Image (spheres, helix red, strand yellow):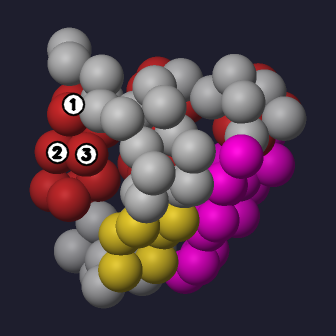
């Protein structure tokens, strides 16, 4: 799955509470931030093998999702912005 497909799929589902996009290659911070901005009801976010996840995205999701209870990125190597 790529950025465009994921944004189109999730962008129309504003009441998503649980999102697991593990092992999706080709996903960038830009699309992750768009997804988080459109999913304000998000309570759980899981992203395994997210080797390109950045501190910018981590900060954004933690500050933008007031209902977030579980944030999981095991096995990730953070990329500095």
Per the model, the C-alpha gap separating discs 1 and 3 is 6 Å
Secondary structure under tag 2 reads helix
Left/right of residue 44 with respect to residue 31 in the rendered view = left
Secondary structure under tag 1 reads helix
Placement of 40 over or under 29, stated as above or below: below
* CB contact under 8 Å: marks 1 and 3: yes
* CB contact under 8 Å: marks 1 and 2: yes
What residue do we see at 20% from left, 18% from top? 80
Q: Which residue is mark 1?
A: 56
Q: Quadrant of the N terminus?
A: top right
Say which of 34 and 50 sits in front. 50
What residue do we see at 45% from left, 51% from top? 75
x and y, in percent, of residue 37 in the image? 41, 48
Secondary structure under tag 3 reads helix
- Give the magenta range: 8-23
Per the model, the C-alpha gap separating discs 1 and 2 is 5 Å
Q: Which residue is mark 2?
A: 59
* CB contact under 8 Å: marks 3 and 2: yes
Q: Which residue is mark 3?
A: 58
Q: Residues within 10 Å of mark 3 (few under 14, many from 20)?
A: some
Kindly tell me whether residue 50 is visible in this rendering. yes
């Amino acid at each position: 799955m790529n950025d465009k497909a994921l944004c189109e799929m999730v962008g129309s589902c504003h009441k998503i509470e649980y999102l697991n996009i593990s092992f999706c290659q080709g996903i960038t911070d830009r699309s992750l931030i768009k997804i988080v901005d459109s999913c304000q009801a998000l309570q759980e976010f899981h992203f395994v093998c997210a080797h390109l996840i950045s501190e910018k995205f981590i900060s954004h999701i933690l500050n933008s999702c007031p209902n977030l209870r579980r944030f999981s990125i095991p096995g990730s190597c953070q990329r500095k912005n």
